[in-house]
Image (tube, rainbow, N blue to C red):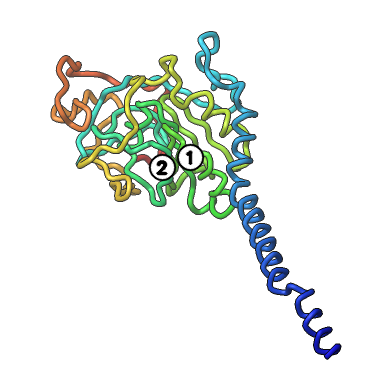
Amino acid sequence: MKAARGSVVSKKGTPWGTIIAVVAIVALAAAVITYYMIASAPKRDQAGREEAAASFAPTASDPDPSKRIPGVVTATYTGSVHVLPTERVAYDKTPPFGGPHDQTWATCTGIVYPNAVRTENMVHALEHGAVWIAYNPQQISGDALNLLSVRAKDKPFTMLSPYPGLDKPISLQSWGHQLKLDSADDPRIDEFIAALRSNPNGVYPEVGASCDAVPGSFDPDNPPPFDPSKPGPDAKPMDYKGSTAAQGEQGAPSAGMPTAPVSAPASAPASGAPSQ
């Protein structure tokens, strides 16, 4: 009897089920916290990069802080020169950062495009104040691509896409501004974005314009593809006055819009440079 009672007491005194449950809960919590720390690290790191670049935000007294960023190239282009979806432009820069462009802008609401997109649509988004991060897909992948993606994903007035044949690993574009770089770690990426994305001080033509998708004209899930071939003799030159049927946004004629706007690049076209 005593042995039996001792056995019962012993069994009641060791709550193995509770212990196992607690251990499982602690292990699960640790796994969740570890996963969160790893998964959120890129965003937390990006927040630090943006904080470091905050001094490049535009102000009334410093309207274009990109002038303080080494390597930034600028040119002057007149906006509102539109071409049809079937037309190409013989751009003077690669990638271009101004000039005639498609009547419909590429969606630029923090889009990470997995494939290269038609250049004429991307240039129109620059006219609206977007920053376009382009990269050479043969040189940028893995962690470097993730570093670029976190700069663009879900960031208003920002877009990222591969650009086949790019002469540098990375190229940043805003209207009239370009910066080419070798590394996704370069702090000038965040400085360029801080200085020029949605800059309200007249550094791009259409302040206040939308970056949203244009239903029926541009599908961000199935955008018009990049054409890697050299523009033919029918391509529109940089001083093109615009196609009559394409002078409104998305091709709708706009009342009071000038009939012959002219783009005036600040420098001559690069000899032999590929363009689209």
Q: In the figure, 31 relative to 125: above or below?
A: below
Residue nearer the viewer, 239 or 57:
57
Q: In which quarter of the image is the N terminus?
A: bottom right
Q: In which quarter of the image is the C terminus?
A: top left
Label 1 vs 2, first from the N-terminus: 2
Q: In the figure, 175 relative to 184: above or below?
A: above
The numbered dot on residue 60 is: none
Residue at point 62% right, 29% down?
A: 51
Instruction: List x then y, in percent, for residue 163.
Output: 43, 46
Structural crowding at the residue carrying mark 1, measured as other residues with C-alpha within 10 Å and reported as few (<14), some (14–19) or many (≥20): many
Q: How far apart are marks 1 and 2 (CA)?
A: 7 Å
Q: Which amino acid does label 1 sit on?
A: Ala
The quarter of the displayed image where residue 25 is located:
bottom right
Task: Give the residue pinned by disc 1.
Answer: 152
Dot 1 and dot 2 residues touching (CB under 8 Å) = yes
Whether residue 244 sits left or right of residue 51 in the image: it is left
Residue at point 70% right, 71% down?
A: 20
Instruction: List x then y, in percent, for residue 265.
Output: 38, 22
Task: Give the residue pinned by disc 2.
Answer: 111
**Element at badge 2?**
strand
